[in-house]
Image (tube, helix red, strand yellow):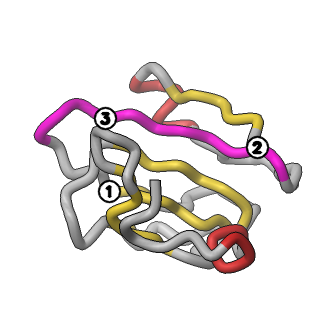
Amino acid sequence: MFQVEVARTSEARSMGLMFRSELDADHGMLFIFAEGTSPTMWMRNTYVPLDMLFLDAEGVVVDVAADTTPLSDTPIASKTPARAVLELNAGTARLLGIRPGDL
């Protein structure tokens, strides 16, 4: 089980997990986007390496960006259309065996 903050506003989605020096192992952040969009993420001003789970409207994992690079402005996008992104500590997807197709 994870304690997840939800980035509900445009401002919250822009800020994400920026400027945090740590993220508890059982915490994360969920970004929900409008239907028909294809979210692109980045790691600007984000010090904690993350796994990004791209989810469809039903909560099924459609792609995983594992072990993202802190402080990078390189765009991170799903290979498959997604409705939401769940950010967790890097290595969580591997540790829990999370992969595309999982709910």
**Callout 1 amino acid:** Thr
**Residue at x 56% of width, y 37% of height:** 15
- Residue 4 rendering spot, x and y as whole percentages: 68, 35
Q: Earlier in the sequence, mark 1 or mark 2?
A: 2
| Residue positioned most to the left | 36
Q: Which mark is residue 5?
A: none
**Callout 2 amino acid:** Met
Please report contact status of discs 2 and 3: CB closer than 8 Å, yes or no: no
- Residue 64 rendering spot, x and y as whole percentages: 45, 71
**Residue at x 76% of width, y 43% of height:** 1
Span shown in magenta:
26-36
Mark 3 residue crowding within 10 angstroms, few (<14) / some (14–19) / many (20+): some
Which secondary structure lies at badge 2?
loop
Which secondary structure lies at badge 3?
loop
State which mark lies toward you, 2 or 3: 2
> Is residue 30 one of those drawn in magenta?
yes
Give the Cα separation between the discs numbered 1 and 2: 26 Å
Give the Cα separation between the discs numbered 2 and 3: 23 Å
Please report contact status of discs 3 and 1: CB closer than 8 Å, yes or no: no
Residue 33 appears in the figure: yes
Q: Earlier in the sequence, mark 2 or mark 3?
A: 2
For label 3, the residue is 33
**Residue at x 66% of width, y 47% of height:** 18
For label 1, the residue is 40
For residue 31, above or below residue 68: above
- Residue 93 rendering spot, x and y as whole percentages: 63, 71
**Callout 3 amino acid:** Phe
For residue 87, above or below residue 8: below
For label 2, the residue is 1
Residue 80 left/right relative to 33: left
- Residue 8 rendering spot, x and y as whole percentages: 47, 21
